Image (cartoon, rainbow, N blue to C red):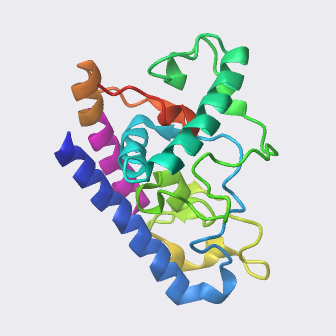
């Protein structure tokens, strides 16, 4: 388990290197930076492997902060359970008898429970993959697009899809992510499942033991 988490953290660090490279190349056109919390709102799915890594970061917080975060997470999950009573341990979205969770409202203003009052992420070094990718388009070195979306605060005067310096071996990176998730799922459930998603509030409450 520790070996899988270590390898996953190393994979996430390659995305941090990519983002820093983008800043060096076209930083004046990118508004995203550490401490920006414009996108740290609402609900979005993360993998179960992200959830386990997130708990590693959460465990490093002091007891008072942990209590505050858990209070927010439990309240959020209780709200979700009013809509989806089946949403119980281990809080895997793909096990719900419907897929309404894939159409979460985009204008939900609820802050992430791991967002400090001062506006910074409490577990920044352990944040999920989607948090590291959000804001910039995800275009493979080959030109294949994995996501054309980008933060509207970025690239206000140019088309980032045409900037080759932003490209990265995303296909290889995502393939590696799936390999690690399959190994992780095999340890947890006995089979190498790939569709194992949850939300950040529920990730904090998963009992991996």
Q: Residue at 71% across / 74% down in the picture?
A: 154
Residue 61 within the segment the image draws in magenta: no
Residue at far front of view? 64
Q: Residue at 71% across / 65% down in the picture?
A: 151
On screen, residue 56 versus residue 108, left or right, reads left
Residue 75 placed where, x, y %?
Answer: 67, 30
Q: Residue at 43% across / 69% down in the picture?
A: 16
Q: In this view of the protein, can residue 145 be seen by the observer?
A: no
Above or below, comparing residue 35 to residue 66 in the picture: below
Q: Residue at 54% across / 31% down in the picture?
A: 202
Residue 24 placed where, x, y %?
Answer: 51, 88
Residue 112 placed where, x, y %?
Answer: 64, 48
Give the residues in magenta. Answer: 169-182
Q: In this view of the protein, can residue 24 be seen by the observer?
A: yes
On screen, residue 148 versus residue 63, left or right, reads right
Residue at far right of view? 107
For the N terminus, give its image quadrant. top left
For the C terminus, give its image quadrant. top left
Q: How many marks?
A: 0
Residue 21 placed where, x, y %?
Answer: 46, 81
Q: Look at the magenta stretch and give its main secondary structure.
A: helix
């Amino acid at each position: 388990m520790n070996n899988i988490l270590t390898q996953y953290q190393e994979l996430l660090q390659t995305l941090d290197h990519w983002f820093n490279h983008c800043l060096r190349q076209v930083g004046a056109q990118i508004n995203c930076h550490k401490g920006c919390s414009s996108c740290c709102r609402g609900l979005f799915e993360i993998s179960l492997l992200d959830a386990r890594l997130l708990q590693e970061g959460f465990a490093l917080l002091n007891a008072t902060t942990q209590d505050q975060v858990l209070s927010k997470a439990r309240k959020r999950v209780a709200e979700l359970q009013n809509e989806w009573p089946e949403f119980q341990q281990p809080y895997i979205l793909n096990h719900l008898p419907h897929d309404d969770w894939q159409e979460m409202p985009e204008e939900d203003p609820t802050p992430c429970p791991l967002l400090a009052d001062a506006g910074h992420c409490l577990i920044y070094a352990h944040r999920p993959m989607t948090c590291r990718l959000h804001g910039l388009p995800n275009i493979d070195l080959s030109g294949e697009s994995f996501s054309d979306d980008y933060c509207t605060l970025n690239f206000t005067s140019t088309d980032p899809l045409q900037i080759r310096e932003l490209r990265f071996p995303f296909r290889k990176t995502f393939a590696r992510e799936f390999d690690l998730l399959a190994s992780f799922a095999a340890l947890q459930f006995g089979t190498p499942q790939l569709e194992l998603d949850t939300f950040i509030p529920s990730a904090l409450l998963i009992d991996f033991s």
